[in-house]
């Protein structure tokens, strides 16, 4: 019986370098350009778990391809390669938004409010709405789009539908977002009113195109539909509704004037508007993706279909109830609708707790990963934020207020930064190194941004609530924003550099070398000294001369063959055979040393 060529601990680059024929099998199971031409630097067993492929089946198929010695391309097809890196431009756009109209602008707004000792300031409305739109339509939406374009096809073992159209949605969305954020600031001017409505319509068109692309991608899969997909589809529906309602709010509010009219308009529509965006779209998408992402990339517990369905109906019916009952409460002032609103909030919290329990998110020890603390903290903040919102009537009663802007703003910040942004940071820190072909263990720790984000978020929630009764809390509340910004800067620099990393073209984790016409002779000799005998047999008499070898560091196999009039097609198989023999001997030596060690211990 011949020795197995493929084993579960082999890194993907080593497999693809040695056995190019395995490429089509791995692409069929969702590799499709991830990590560059030779795949991410992860072991085969992790690839099988992440893509939910039976490990024994995958090993068998790869072994057969390796034994046959099938030829294969060095990388995926152009469209697959393009789709594999499409996320980068969306993630980078999101980071740019964060440091312009997003978090930085929000920090400035908060400093102004703190200086005025007033959180409910109508003259700050335009600045706050511009910042909020950038956060939702830029920071959150760009990350959702980039992640969906890259990950959803691999979730369903299919290809992204129309990748060039997918890329075009960014070029529609980005300039429209910039115009819309500026239009919020000067909405009363006729030019900016028309520009803002036009930009909002373009944003909605880009979102519709995104939803269509993702829907077509998921439908093209031959895989059976799974419970988590209901979250995805309905989150896409909430997304369309959120952007449509956002366009209406901008157009309708442009005709509002006077303090009392603004108070009525904001009181009636701000809550449902943000619930569509934050709970329906962003929250629903995160809860759905988590069910596919967390169990297979971190090894958490899988969510059963029954638990998934319970969480789905609880979450989405509660989002709808939250919007409906809030609107009825505002218009009728009847306590019964307030009670129903509280039940909706309880349903949101119950859905989050069901998923936390199903994942065993805090009860099991996991392999240390720099992104894992963000994931755990995010779900903790989600539960805390929703519990905080449920307790708001008690708080208002205790401080004798009809409505506390400070308390409600604290809840919203706990949910948006603590849950949504923390998940963005955690997920991106997990997937981007893999997609860039980098061993995640070689990346720097993210402990500093983790503690900065959580400290800043905790300070914001605490001191913002305290401003209702303690004026000294305002400066501390303002400071919290810049602590968060510092953490995000730290993380963003790390992520940007990772995205700019170019995957190795000829080496895997183990230093394996591929044989192509452009491979350097010196690379082969450095990794496989025994290959010198093969070169010598083909007439390369100076191959063992250190001086000659030093002077030929940049000589490729193709150039060397031309120099010695050797056919590359004849030399390459001989080199490959020598390299395989060397690897086989190395593995045998390793096993022998292990057995000797065990014998000595016994």
Image (cartoon, rainbow, N blue to C red):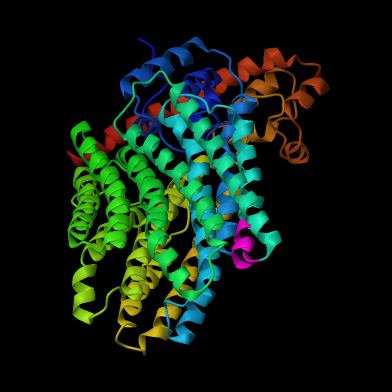
Is 359 part of what is drawn in magenta?
A: no
Place of residue 70 in the rendered image (x, y in percent of width and height, measured from the top left): 54, 12
Front-most of 589 and 372? 372
Q: Is residue 508 visible?
A: no
Front-most of 263 and 125? 263
Which quadrant is the C terminus positioned in? Answer: top left
Is residue 110 depicted above or below 429 in this figure? below
Residue at image location 63% in from the left, 23% down from the top: 533
Place of residue 582 in the rendered image (x, y in percent of width and height, measured from the top left): 50, 26
Place of residue 531 in the rendered image (x, y in percent of width and height, measured from the top left): 61, 26
Is 183 part of what is drawn in magenta?
A: yes
Is residue 383 depicted above or below 551 in this figure? below
Quadrant hosting residue 568: top right
Place of residue 31 in the rendered image (x, y in percent of width and height, measured from the top left): 49, 29
Residue at image location 63% in from the left, 66% down from the top: 188
User: As drawn, which residue projects farthest toward the bottom?
Assistant: 472
Front-most of 234 and 483? 234
Residue at image location 69% in from the left, 61% down from the top: 190
Q: Which residues are magenta?
A: 179-188
**Magenta: predominant secondary structure element?**
helix
Which quadrant is the N terminus positioned in? Answer: top left
């Amino acid at each position: 019986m011949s020795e197995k060529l493929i084993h579960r601990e082999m890194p993907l680059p080593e497999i693809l370098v040695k056995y190019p024929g395995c490429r089509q099998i791995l692409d069929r199971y969702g590799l499709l350009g991830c990590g560059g031409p030779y795949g991410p630097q992860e072991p085969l067993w992790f690839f099988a778990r992440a893509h939910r492929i039976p490990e024994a089946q995958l090993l068998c198929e790869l072994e057969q391809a390796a034994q046959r010695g099938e030829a294969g391309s060095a990388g995926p097809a152009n469209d697959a390669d393009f789709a594999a890196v499409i996320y980068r431009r969306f993630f980078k756009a999101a980071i740019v938004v964060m440091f312009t109209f997003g978090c930085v602008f929000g920090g400035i707004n908060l400093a102004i409010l703190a200086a005025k000792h007033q959180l409910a300031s109508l003259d700050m409305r335009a600045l706050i709405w511009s910042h909020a739109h950038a956060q939702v339509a830029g920071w959150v939406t760009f990350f959702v789009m980039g992640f969906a374009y890259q990950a959803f096809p691999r979730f369903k073992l299919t290809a992204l539908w129309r990748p060039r159209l997918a890329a075009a949605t960014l070029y529609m969305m980005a300039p429209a977002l910039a115009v819309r954020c500026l239009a919020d600031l000067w909405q009363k001017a006729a030019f900016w009113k028309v520009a803002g409505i036009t930009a909002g319509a373009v944003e909605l068109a880009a979102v519709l195109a995104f939803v269509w692309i993702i829907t077509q991608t998921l439908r093209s899969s031959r895989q059976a539909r799974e419970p988590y997909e209901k979250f995805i589809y309905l989150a896409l529906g909430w997304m369309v509704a959120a952007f449509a309602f956002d366009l209406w709010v901008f157009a309708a509010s442009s005709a509002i004037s006077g303090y009392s009219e603004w108070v009525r308009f904001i009181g009636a529509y701000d809550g449902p508007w943000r619930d569509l965006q934050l709970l329906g779209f962003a929250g629903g998408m995160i809860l759905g993706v988590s069910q596919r992402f967390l169990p297979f990339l971190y090894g958490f517990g899988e969510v059963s279909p029954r638990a998934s369905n319970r969480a789905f109906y609880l979450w989405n019916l509660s989002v709808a109830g939250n919007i409906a009952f809030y609107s009825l409460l505002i218009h009728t002032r009847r306590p019964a609708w307030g009670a129903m609103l509280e039940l909706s909030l309880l349903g949101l919290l119950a859905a989050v707790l069901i998923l936390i329990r199903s994942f065993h998110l805090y009860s099991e020890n996991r392999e240390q990963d720099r992104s894992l603390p963000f994931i755990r903290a995010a779900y903790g903040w989600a539960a805390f934020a929703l519990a905080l919102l449920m307790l708001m009537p008690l708080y208002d009663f205790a401080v004798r207020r009809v409505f506390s802007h400070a308390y409600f703003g604290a809840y919203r910040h706990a949910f948006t930064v603590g849950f949504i942004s923390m998940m963005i940071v955690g997920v991106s820190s997990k997937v981007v190194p893999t997609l860039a072909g980098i061993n995640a263990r070689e990346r720097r720790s993210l402990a500093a941004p983790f503690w900065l984000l959580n400290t800043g978020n905790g300070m914001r929630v605490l001191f913002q609530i305290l401003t209702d009764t303690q004026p000294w809390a305002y400066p501390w509340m303002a400071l919290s924003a810049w602590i968060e910004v510092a953490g995000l800067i730290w993380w963003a620099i790390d992520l940007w550099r990772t995205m700019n990393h170019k995957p190795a073209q000829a080496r895997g984790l183990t230093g394996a070398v591929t044989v192509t016409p452009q491979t350097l002779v010196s690379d082969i000799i450095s990794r496989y000294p025994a290959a010198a005998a093969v070169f010598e047999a083909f007439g390369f008499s100076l191959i063992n001369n250190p001086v000659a070898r030093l002077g030929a560091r940049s000589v490729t196999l193709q150039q060397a063959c031309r120099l010695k009039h050797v056919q590359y097609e004849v030399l390459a198989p001989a080199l490959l055979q020598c390299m395989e023999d060397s690897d086989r001997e190395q593995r045998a030596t390793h096993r022998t040393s292990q057995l000797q060690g065990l014998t000595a211990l016994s």
